[in-house]
Image (cartoon, coloured by chain):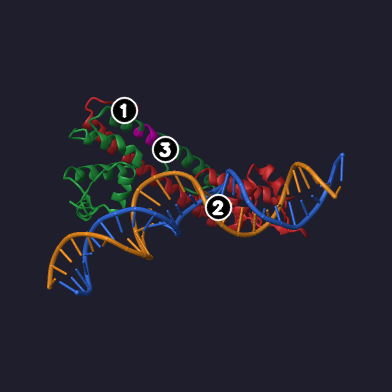
Chain colours: A green, B red, C orange, D blue
Amino acid sequence: MRIGELAERTGVSTRSLRYYEQHGLLSARRGPNGYREYAEEDVKLVSEIRSLLSVGFTLEDTRPFVDCLRSGHSSGGSCSESVEVYQRKIMQIDEEIRVLLARRAEVAAQLAQSCPGCFVRGDK
Amino acid sequence: MRIGELAERTGVSTRSLRYYEQHGLLSARRGPNGYREYAEEDVKLVSEIRSLLSVGFTLEDTRPFVDCLRSGHSSGGSCSESVEVYQRKIMQIDEEIRVLLARRAEVAAQLAQSCPGCFVRGDK
DNA sequence: CTTGACGTTGACGTCGGTGTCAACGTTTAC
DNA sequence: GTAAACGTTGACACCGACGTCAACGTCAAG
C-alpha cells in the first residue's frame, strides 16, 4: 500500500503521514522507485495515533502506544508505559480543569464587581 | 515617564509595552528625541491589560477595557462592551471545561479498557 | 571624550500539527 | 507518446505573546 491509499483509508493527509514518519512514529519500506510501502498494520497504527491526538495527546505522547502496537500487542494501551501516559494525561487534564475553574471564578468575580446584578448563564 | 520606568513600575518588559502599542492598546507621546513619554494613567492601563491576560484573555480581548479606561471610566470593566467580553469569556471557559471533562472521560474509559482494575486518582 | 545605561526600529525564534507550493521523478490509463 | 494522477524532498506560512539580538541614536556621569 502506498501513501495515497493509506491516507485515504485512514482519513489522514499524506502530509501528516510523512510528518509522523519524520518523528519516528511511522516507518515504511521503500520500493525500488523510492515510494513508501506500507503494511496492513499501519492502518491500525495511524488510527491509534489519530485517536490519541483527538483527545489531546501530543504526538510524543503517542509514541509508547505505537511502540506497544509494533511490539505485537493487539492494543496500544496494553503496555505499562502506555498506562503511565494515560495516567499522566488524566492528571494533566485534571490540572487544566482546575486552572480553568479558578479562572472562571476570577473572571466571574471581576464581572460581578464591575457589573453588580449581572448574572452568568450557568451560575448557581 | 519613559518606557524603562513604566516597565519597572508595572513589571512588564519593554518588549511587551512596545508590542501593546504596536497593537493599538497603548499610546505614547514622543519626546523631541523620539523617546516614548508615558502618563501616570498608563500604569493603570498596563496593569489592567496584564490582569486580563493573566486570566486567559487574548490581547484583543483587552481592547474594550483599555478603551473604557481611556474614555475616563475609573474601571475598565464599567463599559457595556467590557461586560460583554466578560460574559463571552466565561462562556468560552465553560466550553473549554466541557471539552476537557469529555476528554477526561474518554481517556479514563480507554485506560479502564486496556487496564482493567487501574484506578485514577480523583475518580469516584 | 568616553563609557555605559537607556532609547529606537526591525527581524527572527519559539511551539505543534498541518496546509500548501515548488520542482521534480514515476506510474497509469488512454 | 502524452497527459493526469501520484510519488519524492524541502521550505515557507500559520497562530500569539513575547524573548532576544542587531545596529544604531541619546544622554548623564566621570
* Chain letter belonging to callout 2: B
For marks 1 and 3, give the CA distance.
16 Å
Marks 1 and 2, the one that precedes in the sequence = 2
Residue A68: image location, x then y, percent: 24, 33
Q: Secondary structure at mark 3?
A: helix
Q: Is residue A90 magenta?
A: yes
In the image, residue B59 lies in the stretch drawn in magenta: no
Q: Where does the image place residue C29, in percent across and percent down from the top left?
A: 13, 67
Kindly identify which chain the residue marked by label 1 belongs to. Answer: B
Q: Residue B107 shows which numbered tag? A: none
Label placed on residue B120: 1
Sort mark 3 into few (<14), some (14-19) or many (20+) by Cα contacts within 10 Å: some
Q: Is residue A120 something that shows in the picture? A: no
Mark 3 falls within which chain? Answer: A
Q: Is residue A23 visible?
A: yes
Local crowd size for mark 1, using a 10 Å CA cut-off: few (<14), some (14–19), many (≥20)? some
Q: Nearer the viewer, residue B54 or C24?
A: C24
Residue occupied by mark 3: A96
> What x and y, as percent, mark residue A80?
27, 27
Q: Is residue D3 above or below residue A98?
A: below
Asked which secondary structure carries label 2, the reply is helix
Kindly identify the residue that appears in the image at 72 percent across and 45 percent down: B5
- What segment is highlighted magenta in the picture? A89-94
Quarter of the image that includes the C terminus of chain B:
top left
Give amino acid for label 2.
Thr
